[in-house]
Amino acid sequence: MDWRDHGILLSNRRHGETAAIIEVFTQAHGRHAGVVRGGTSRKIAPILQPGAQLDVLWRARLEEHIGTFQVEPLRSRAAAAFSGRLALAGLNAVVSLLSFCLPEREPHPGIYKQTEQLMDLLGHDEIWPLAYLRWELALLDELGFGLDLSACAVTGTTETLIYVSPKSGRAVSAEGAGEWADKLLDLPPCLRGQGRAPDAEVRAGLMTTGYFLENKLAVSLGHRPLPEARARFVEQFSRRL
């Protein structure tokens, strides 16, 4: 059996003397692994860089087999990724989180499209962190841990929403927080999609999405620790403050 698709390369590791095993996030077939014969050769190895956009042809005798990939480059993102430390850290955070949390071979076309758009912004350091934050929100939503930031969970108001409940993921207003304010997470305006945001606000948003990635999503995956690449990206970004 075989199929053809477009995908984003997530990882690449050597297999034997000349082959490589790659993991690709594809549009219609989800996160999928396969062997690339000659993947360590001078011709193919430069193509197999994390973040690269590929046209892939997967073949296997049975669906449950790991199978083999034939790959053709569509778009390299190496130049953008190596344009600076923030871009490289951001790329590593994205591919690591996708490998960590996406079920194998399960299509997620919505988050695939958003990931493709995010990757195409690599190197644009002034706008990329906010785009990344919104991508994390979309990833949480895609996997069943979306935040409801439309109205206060306590009063129902849509005004003065400045907190997020760590338990429910719902917004909480200043009035509704009451004596529980110090136990709630920050809700900066950028988490509600309100235009551009200063770096400090984006960082506050990353602290909130990070809480749900670590304490909800990772817990659902067997209490596995989040990839360190995400923390490295947040640390690199925080140096701009």
Image (spheres, helix red, strand yellow):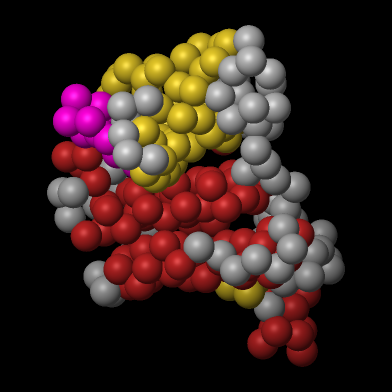
Judging depth in this view, the residue of 211 and 73 nearest the camera is: 73
On-image quarter of the N terminus: top right
Q: Which residue is drawn at the image coordinates 26% and 52% (left, top)?
A: 87
Q: Which residue is drawn at the image coordinates 63% and 74% (left, top)?
A: 185
Q: Is residue 124 above or below residue 31?
A: below
Image x and y of residue 69, in percent: 45, 22
On the image, which quarter does residue 182 sit in?
bottom right
Q: Is residue 188 visible?
A: no
Residue at the limit of the structure toward the front, as seen here? 17
Which SS does the magenta portion mostly show? loop
Q: Which residue is drawn at the image coordinates 70% and 84% (left, top)?
A: 183
Image x and y of residue 153, in percent: 81, 63
Q: Is residue 139 above or below residue 213?
A: above
Magenta span of residues: 40-52
Image x and y of residue 176, in percent: 77, 74
**Drawn side of residue 74 relative to residue 141, left or right:** left
